[in-house]
Amino acid sequence: MKDHPEDDAEQDEVADALRRDVARKRRARRRRDRGALFGLGTFGLVGWSVSLPTVAGLALGIWLDGRVDGTFSWTLALLMAGICLGCANAWYWISQESRRAVDDDVRDGDGGD
């Protein structure tokens, strides 16, 4: 009985998946020192990247509302601007970390899947 080309392709896919799994486990073992403290540090970085612009916008808005007469609320406007800037900043840091992780996967032969 002759093997079907579809069977070979399916076996290749399974073998590739196993190789990726083994490579992922090897990377995890190498990165054990990145445990809970690394996660807290990353969480802290994202938290600070959102909270600092938010608090700065709030403080500047309160200061401007005390100095400028008008119906426009600088506090609310700059609070929203600070939140938007902080979220953009957090998105940037997270995308950088994701890009680094994908680059590590490609370098280790995982293909980023």
Image (cartoon, helix red, strand yellow):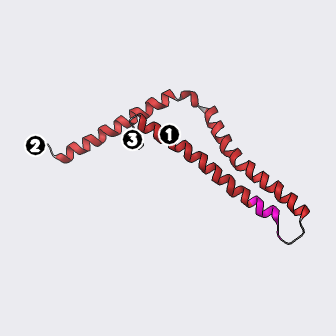
* Residue 4: percent from left, percent from top: 15, 46
Q: Quadrant of residue 10?
A: top left
* Residue 77: percent from left, percent from top: 77, 64
Left/right of residue 109 with respect to residue 36 in the rendered view: left
Q: Residues within 10 Å of mark 2 (few under 14, many from 20)?
A: few
Q: Amino acid at mark 1?
A: Ala
In the image, residue 101 sits, relative to residue 56, either above or below, namely above
Location of mark 3 (residue): 111
Q: Which mark is residue 101?
A: 1
Location of mark 2 (residue): 2
| Residue in front for this viewpoint, 53 or 3 | 53
Q: Amino acid at mark 3?
A: Gly
Judged by its main secondary structure, the magenta piece is helix
Identity of the residue drawn at 51% across and 44% down: 99
Identity of the residue drawn at 65% across and 41% down: 43
Q: Along the polypeptide, which appears first: circle 2 or circle 3?
A: 2
Identity of the residue drawn at 82% across and 56% down: 60
Left/right of residue 57 with respect to residue 102 in the rendered view: right
* Residue 57: percent from left, percent from top: 78, 55
Magenta residues span: 72-79
The span from disc 2 to disc 3 (Cα, nearest Å) is: 32 Å
Q: Amino acid at mark 2?
A: Lys
Q: Considering the numbered disc 1 on the image, is that residue within a helix, a strand or a loop?
A: helix
Q: Considering the numbered disc 3 on the image, is that residue within a helix, a strand or a loop?
A: loop
In the image, residue 5 sits, relative to residue 81, either above or below, namely above
Asked if disc 2 and disc 3 are in contact, CB closer than 8 Å, the reply is: no
